[in-house]
Amino acid sequence: MNFIQKIVIFSLLIISHTIYADYGYPIKNPIAATVVGTPEALRITQADLQDRQPDYVKMPALNTQFKRTIDKEYKISIFPNRIIPDVFWYEKGGLKYSIAEHKTQAPLMFIIAGTGASYNSVTVKNLQKTFYQVGYHVVAISSPTIPNFMYNASRTVIPGNLLEDSEDIYHVMQRIMEKHNDIPVSDYFLTGYSLGASHAAFVTRIDDQRKSNQKDSFQFKKTLLINPPLNLVTSVDVLDKMFEENIPGGIDHFHEFFERFINKASTFYRENEELGVGKEFFYEILKEQPPSEEEMKVMIGFVFRISSTGMIFGADVFNRQGYIVPKNKVDKLTPSSSLTHYSKVAHRLGFNDYIKHFYLPTFEKKRGVSVEELIEQASLESIETYLKGNGKIALMHNMDDPILLPGEIDTLKSLFPGRTMIYPYGGHMGNLQYKKNVIDMINYFDDKKIFNKDDVVSLVTGEMQ
């Protein structure tokens, strides 16, 4: 990570010094929590999970678990005859994924990554290592929104349809287990975070609709959704607006804003060089020159914008839609082609632009359904009856998640009656590595979590009552 990247990421760190009696996660600003995550001292460690570790788990020395690689990476060919454009040469060769497996029979956990995240993202790695230590084989799968999945495993190469993307994920899971049929599995479990959580709900439903005696069905014992959006369309609109509506003067002035932001940090660095570019430096700059709420929102939206750019460009080129690259120029793109011009265009487009002007028109024509129906299908409410009646799917979320609109957390709770763990703060997955959250997660899969009648984590003790 270079200096500027560190400035962008760590400059969003605003940590409250008060440890609240109601819930120990210390960052009450949801925007800061979203980017910063959990302070290192409060993260789950190998020592915290020692008493949950089965005898068959071979572990290294204490406190090194989260510093070592416990998985192996693989590739699988889902569409062997598919021709991937040469401009995407780096994605040829198959879908990438990873597996952390034990040498004995054990339950297997599938993890589905969130928007713009791969199987080897930091968040997925942390979840993978946690479940591995407590005894699961763990298969990590990328989000359908990243290019490697799009080109190698998506039937349409136009991500955004929850059902079709989930069917693609399910097919990938089946093919992976066919390839690794020597892994001794006792039961199957499933989790996903952010958009990956929405996919996990649909994947579980797809599996339940298959006959239990079909050899390639999983019959998931339990599924946990972590911080899913209620509706994909409304949540991406929230994220796009964070970027576009908080830049002084509008999006055309983003580069000026960014330069001022970086220059401010660089000046502080020159005046305090003895601190080095580390945690102490960022802690000090935040005390002396804390970013404004608007600055934090712009940077959050910008990170999201970067992650969506590759998806939009890839879907456009592969499907020859002419949205970014003119149709008559697609065949002229080579591995050595300059993409600077197209990149500038793509960065001006938000995920919401892609949804409204690319995905929705394409599927409206392809499926013969209205835009309104497609937007409804992008919501967990589209499978409301299934979710309410399925006791093996639970929800973990935060009251202050900034990707949700007012009232949406209550709607989400209503979809999982008696099966929710809702925390008072943590932003969007900022508390995912917080000790209590991880233990609650493990307890749920181990049948040790007892939900209260109000489905809310107590704001007094932080415990389920």
Image (spheres, helix red, strand yellow):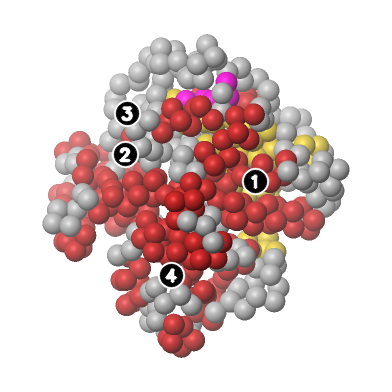
Q: Nearer the viewer, mark 4 or mark 3?
A: 4
Q: Of callouts 1 and 2, which one flags the residue occurring earlier in the amino acid sequence?
A: 2
Does the magenta run of residues contain 419? yes
In percent of the image, x 45 and y 64: which residue is there? 361
Tell me the kind of residue under disc 4: Phe
Q: Nearer the viewer, mark 1 or mark 2?
A: 1
The residue indicated by pointer 3 is 28
Q: How many marks?
A: 4
Q: Position of residue 420 (x, y in %)?
A: 54, 25
Q: CA distance from mark 1 to mark 2?
A: 30 Å
The residue indicated by pointer 1 is 203
Tell me the kind of residue under disc 3: Lys
The residue indicated by pointer 4 is 313
Q: Determine the secondary structure under disc 2.
A: helix
**Residue 185 as seen in the image, left or right of residue 13:** right
Checking the image for residue 31, the label placed there is 2
Give the magenta-colored segment's residue range: 418-422
Name the quadrant of the N terminus. bottom left
Q: Determine the secondary structure under disc 3.
A: loop
Q: Of callouts 4 and 2, which one flags the residue occurring earlier in the amino acid sequence?
A: 2
Q: Position of residue 36 (x, y in %)?
A: 36, 40
Tell me the kind of residue under disc 2: Ile
**Residue 402 vertical placement versus 462 (above, below):** below
Q: CA distance from mark 4 to mark 3?
A: 36 Å
Tell me the kind of residue under disc 1: Val
Say if residue 47 shows up in the picture.
Answer: no
Q: Nearer the viewer, mark 1 or mark 4?
A: 1
In percent of the image, x 43 and y 87: which residue is there? 328
